[in-house]
Image: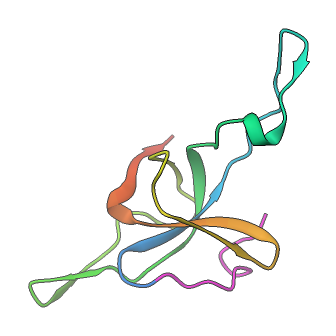
Amino acid sequence: MATATDIKVKPLADRVVIKALEESEQMRGGLYIPDTAKEKPQQGEVVAVGNGRIEDGKRVDMELKVGDKVLYGKYSGTEVTVEGEQYLILRESDVLAVVG
């Protein structure tokens, strides 16, 4: 998995870059579930953060930091592929919770 220093994407303002955590492959009733039928994970690790948003002319620092494990909404953000790795870019406000 890429670390913050390996990733070539630097998010702007209050955006974060998240690498989805892979769920272990599950067998239900002895049937193989193909990747296309699995639900996307809604948990990931923050790999890069922006500088924060501007509010009333002042910069508001980010609460999230690189390495945080987070939960996010199912349809949040934009999926991008950088150097063969898939990432999700979303606003800090779209993150629902920090895990652990």
Residue 85, how many percent across, how many down?
77, 69
Magenta region: 1-11
| Residue 9 lies within the magenta run | yes
Coloring scheme used: rainbow
Image quadrant of residue 12? Answer: bottom left
Find the residue positioned furthest to the front. 36
Find the residue positioned furthest to the top. 29
* Residue displayed at 12% across by 90% down: 57
- Dominant secondary structure (helix, strand or loop) of the stretch shown in magenta: loop
The N terminus lies in which quarter of the figure? bottom right
Residue 23, how many percent across, how many down?
73, 37
| Residue 6 lies within the magenta run | yes
Find the residue positioned furthest to the bottom. 57
Q: Is residue 24 left or right of residue 61?
A: right
Image quadrant of residue 67? Answer: bottom right
Reply above or below: 53 against 43. below
Residue 24, how many percent across, how many down?
80, 34
Q: Is residue 30 left or right of residue 58?
A: right
Find the residue positioned furthest to the left. 56
* Residue displayed at 83% across by 28% down: 33
Reply above or below: 21 against 79. above
* Residue displayed at 45% across by 55% down: 76
Reply above or below: 19 against 34. below
Q: Looking at the picture, tell me which residue is in the foreground, 100 or 96.
A: 96
Q: Looking at the picture, tell me which residue is in the foreground, 98 or 96.
A: 96
Residue 10, how many percent across, how many down?
55, 85
